[in-house]
Amino acid sequence: MSAYARIPGLASRAAVTSAVTVATLAGAALVPNATPEAEAATPAGKALKVAAAKKGAPYKYGAAGPRRFDCSGLTQYSYKKAGKKLPRTAAAQYNRSKKVSVKSRKKGDLVFFHSGGRVYHVGIYAGSGKIWHSPKPGKTVRKEKIWTKSVRYGRVR
């Protein structure tokens, strides 16, 4: 007789707990791109959701929301809604963030585009090589594939 069987009700509770654990793990494996609740609850996860919710908002130079954005205005606004304070420009946001490698990047990290050592654009990493950003005049907030290798990643602290 097992140790579980000697304690009334313990065997059935252990079986239920095991079944629930297996079902939970299997469910997570079967739903690709599912965001775990813990990840979504982080400031980075919240900022990513805020940026995605602004899809279609028009670009306007110097705008930081809530209806129009430039690139750093979108990242600043999104993180502010997630409870984190960021400076206003892409370069200042780069200087404030914790640098992370391509291999260490996570959804919600900032993606900085640079040329000649100068940061000229920023977006929020959405996973699978894509970002949410406010690209340029005449365009709207959108999710797009990262189009260059001249990027650096930063994590908001």
Image (spheres, rainbow, N blue to C red):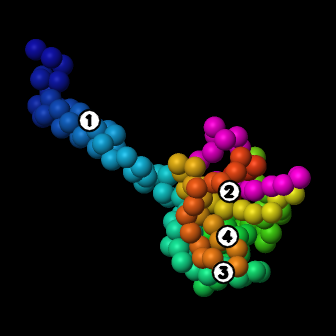
Q: Quick one: label 2 or label 1, which is nearer the N terminus?
A: 1
| Residue assigned mark 4 | 135
Q: Position of residue 2 (x, y in %)?
A: 15, 17
Position in image of residue 61 (x %, y %): 75, 80
Real-space CA distance between mark 4 and mark 1, rounded to the nearest whole angstrom: 43 Å
Q: What residue type is labelled 2?
A: Leu
Q: Is residue 59 left or right of residue 97?
A: left
Give the number of the mark in front: 2 or 4: 4
* Disc 3 residue type (three-letter): Gly
Percent from the top left, x then y, of residue 113? 75, 56
Of tags 3 and 4, which is closer to the observer?
3
How crowded pointer 3 is (Cα within 10 Å; few <14, some 14-19, many 20+) is rated as few
Look at 62% across and 81% down and name the residue there.
58
Q: Is the residue under label 4 in contact with that under label 2 (CB below 8 Å)? A: no
For the residue carrying disc 4, how many other residues have a C-alpha within 10 Å: few (<14), some (14-19), or many (20+)? many
Disc 2 and disc 1: Cα gap in Å?
35 Å
Residue at coordinates 56% horizontally, 69% vertically from top-left?
142
Find numbered disc 2 in the image and state the secondary structure of the residue it sits on.
strand
Report which quarter residue 130 is drawn in: bottom right
CB atoms of marks 1 and 3 within 8 Å: no
Is 71 situated left or right of 45 in this image? right
- Number of residues whose C-alpha sits closer than 10 Å to that of mark 2, classed few (under 14), some (14–19) or many (20 or more): many
Q: Mark 3 points at which residue?
A: 138
How far apart marks 1 and 3 lie (CA) works out to 50 Å
Q: Is residue 114 left or right of residue 60?
A: right
Q: Which residue sits furthest top?
A: 1
Amino acid on which the number 4 mark rests in the picture: Pro
Magenta extent: 100-117
The residue at which mark 1 appears reads as: 22
Query: Label 2, on which residue?
Result: 110
- Picture quadrant of residue 134: bottom right
